[in-house]
Amino acid sequence: MGVTGSVREVFADPESSQRHADLRELADRAGVAWHVVGSEVVAAMSQTVHPQGMVARCGFVDVTLADLVDRRPRLVAVCADIRDPGNAGSVLRCADAAGAEGVVFAGDTVDPYNPKAVRSSVGSLFHLDVVIETETAATIETLRAGGMRVVAAEGSAELDLDTADDHGVLDGPTAWLFGNEAWGLPDAVRGLADVSVRVPIHGRAESLNLAAAAAVCLYASARAQRNASR
Amino acid sequence: MGVTGSVREVFADPESSQRHADLRELADRAGVAWHVVGSEVVAAMSQTVHPQGMVARCGFVDVTLADLVDRRPRLVAVCADIRDPGNAGSVLRCADAAGAEGVVFAGDTVDPYNPKAVRSSVGSLFHLDVVIETETAATIETLRAGGMRVVAAEGSAELDLDTADDHGVLDGPTAWLFGNEAWGLPDAVRGLADVSVRVPIHGRAESLNLAAAAAVCLYASARAQRNASR
């Protein structure tokens, strides 16, 4: 699913319309209406302090969990009960960069279509499969039934990421499970993963923030999978 | 340098003073004045939307670059011209977690004492050596003279992080150089590093955000150094 296929119409101020003639041509060819409007209109639509002169109205892009599993993904991130839209966008961007096929927003999690989440995903919302699922436990079961090892990122886990990597834990198809920024994984979900892994803390920080932990975990998986398939 | 040694006085509302009796005892023993004030006073001092009922006035904690180099550090992060206080705090937290001895804020970089930077460092500002240096080129020279390999994180570098790791590039004392969120390393600094390395992008994201890239790079160094010293 690319961004082009999701765009319904574009609103741009005169300056942006001129500066991005290439985009306008793309829109024309795709039959997407391009409305030249005053910059105050774009500002009112864009909900950001420094609007960039252009807003696209897009269709929803999320797919079902079954669609994602049918693709036999090798790397998936599951965000359970996360609350910060900036984190949601950062995990999307980072999962995309690490080569994940999908991100599941599970349980009582911030809406990935929240404007701040969309902006901080910097386009990655349109690059991979986005799934919204209310039942986190069922999500875990479905991913496991689809052949994935479910690995929970937990600060208190005994097994650290480097040791897990050394022992081949990350070599196969993996679904990473990330919990809430403040209290981690929901109680109902703790223990449902196949294994829990912590990012080692070598210094005196109490923890990593969610986006940084996700980056380290997802990149460890990408490396392990590539090394295993060599 | 611990947070305890830097605190000059504490302002707390009655509820926080009661809830954190342990902290108050610590302060008493250290001879740090504890002022019980109205919660509206704490709110006015704390510059945040959801103040936590307590504010400490601290001394500056930064040290000179010479102080840091004298410790013969094995892992250092240098932020050159970065602008976002949240990123500054995130890099501090992440460098601390990865076991770095110091973070250098070089060139025209956001003040690490910016309230948002302090908050997003979640205490790590007090855990490692913080250095503020205006001359980035001189900083690179000094770190190199101190026995560190200076590795620039650059999205356009030919060498990717995994290959660098495989070839032992990260095994020794390393100073990572991170540039501005939008335009990367300053021109005057590009090319001064010993080697440039990119975090591989496996999917369709154009790049990683600064804090995520720093997390991946610093943790790759921590792992490489530990493996090399086994």
Image (tube, coloured by chain):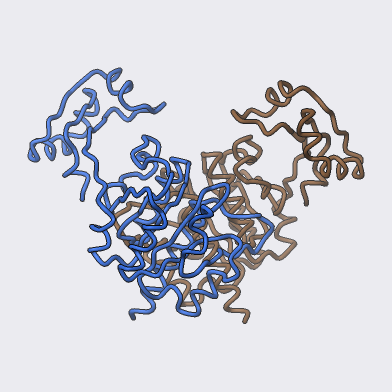
Chain colours: A brown, B blue
Please report the residue visible at 43 percent of the width from the left and 56 percent of the height from the top: A154
Question: Residue A19 is drawn in which quadrant?
Answer: top right
Q: What residue is shown at x 31% (from left), y 47% (from top)?
A: B125
Which of these two is toward me, B217 or B78? Answer: B78
Percent position of residue B162, x then y: 54, 72
Whether residue A156 appears in this view of the structure is no
Q: Is residue B77 left or right of residue A24?
A: left
The C terminus of chain B: image quadrant: bottom left
The residue under the point 55% across, 51% down is B209
Indicate whether B103 appears above or below A30: below
Q: Does residue B32 lie above or below B126 as drawn?
A: above
Q: Nearer the viewer, residue B136 or A191?
A: B136
Residue A220 x %, y %: 52, 67
Q: Residue shown at 83%/37% (left/top)?
A: A8
In the rendered image, the vertical position of residue B30 relative to residue A39, given as above or below: below
Q: Report if residue B145 is visible in the image.
A: yes
Along the viewing direction, whichever of B226 and A1 lies nearer the viewer? B226
Task: State how many labels appear.
Answer: 0
- Residue A30 appears in which quarter of the rendering? top right
Percent from the top left, x then y, of residue B120?
Answer: 39, 42
The percent coordinates of residue A48 (x first, y second) are 61, 30
Is B142 left or right of A222, judged from the image as shown? left
Question: Image check: B139 left or right of B80?
Answer: left
Residue nearer the viewer, B125 or A107: B125
